[in-house]
Image: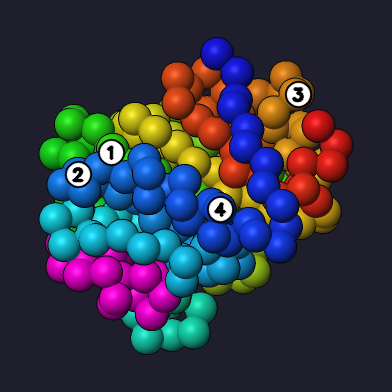
């Protein structure tokens, strides 16, 4: 199985991507959300009811939840606070990274056994997803579902591991911008392993789709 891709006009990308997400969302299931600039543009356009949805995070910086760098803060302001979400499982970035990762692992165990209904991820121009950068030790095979990581920006971070990400039944990768066109081509048409190109963790997934704007799709 290879990646699917959908390409939307750049000027309507946020609305088009939001409509697609809403059409696939199980209103009584589980949803993994992500940070990043593309997601931040899409979330305000996402018209959904999350009152019966379990919400989880793919990754987080090790900062308090009210810190401007917090993924939770961004998602809370742009999405969760206006969609009725109450069953929200955030990563506790203010705690010890090792303890926070263990606590999130424990919270993930039962839902990973069932499987996440929907997962939203971004992708960097280095092909990282969640907080899994190329050659990250967290990409190695492990039973852990969440691990602490050292981020390139100098912050400590927390991330779902490949073992947790693999539990998603449906994955949407939200990617925009010409600066990521080469990374998109590497992920979709290349044959690198996931250690060098983490987005290829989903290369054999039965329902993984890149949601691209025209600029990001320019090299396909």
Residue that appears at 56% across and 53% down: 16
Please say whether residue 167 is one of the residues in the magenta stretch: no
Q: Looking at the image, which is closer to me, 55 or 128?
A: 55
Label drawn at residue 29:
2
Q: Is residue 69 visible?
A: yes
Q: Which residue is mark 4?
A: 16
Residue that appears at 42% across and 62% down: 46
Q: Earlier in the sequence, mark 1 or mark 2?
A: 2
> Residue placed farthest to the top in the image?
1
Which range is magenta? Answer: 75-99
Q: Earlier in the sequence, mark 1 or mark 3?
A: 1
- Location of the C terminus by quadrant is top right
Q: Looking at the image, which is closer to me, 192 or 29?
A: 29
Q: Looking at the image, which is closer to me, 32 or 45?
A: 45
Q: CA distance from mark 1 to mark 3?
A: 27 Å
**At numbered mark 4, what does the secondary structure look like: helix, strand or loop?**
helix
Label drawn at residue 116:
1
Residue that appears at 80% across and 51% down: 215
Of badges 2 and 3, nearer the viewer stands 2
- Residue 136 location, x and y as percent? 58, 43
């Amino acid at each position: 199985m290879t990646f699917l891709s959908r390409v939307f006009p750049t000027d309507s990308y946020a609305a088009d991507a939001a409509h697609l997400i809403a059409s696939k969302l199980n209103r009584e299931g589980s949803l993994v959300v992500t940070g990043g600039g593309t997601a931040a543009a899409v979330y305000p356009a996402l018209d959904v009811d999350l009152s019966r949805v379990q919400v989880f995070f793919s990754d987080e910086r090790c900062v308090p939840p009210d810190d401007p760098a917090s993924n939770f803060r961004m998602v809370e302001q742009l999405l969760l606070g206006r969609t009725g979400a109450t069953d929200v499982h955030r990563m506790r970035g203010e705690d010890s990274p090792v303890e926070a990762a263990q606590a999130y692992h424990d919270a993930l165990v039962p839902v990973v056994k069932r499987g996440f209904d929907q997962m939203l991820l971004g992708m960097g121009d280095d092909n990282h997803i969640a907080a899994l950068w190329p050659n990250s030790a967290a990409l190695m095979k492990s039973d852990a579902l969440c691990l602490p990581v050292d981020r390139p920006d100098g912050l400590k971070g927390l991330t779902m591991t490949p073992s947790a990400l693999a539990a998603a039944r449906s994955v949407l990768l939200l990617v925009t911008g010409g600066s990521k066109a080469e990374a998109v081509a590497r992920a979709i048409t290349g044959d690198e392993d996931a250690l060098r190109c983490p987005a290829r963790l989903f290369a054999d997934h039965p329902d993984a789709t890149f949601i691209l704007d025209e600029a990001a799709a320019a090299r396909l």
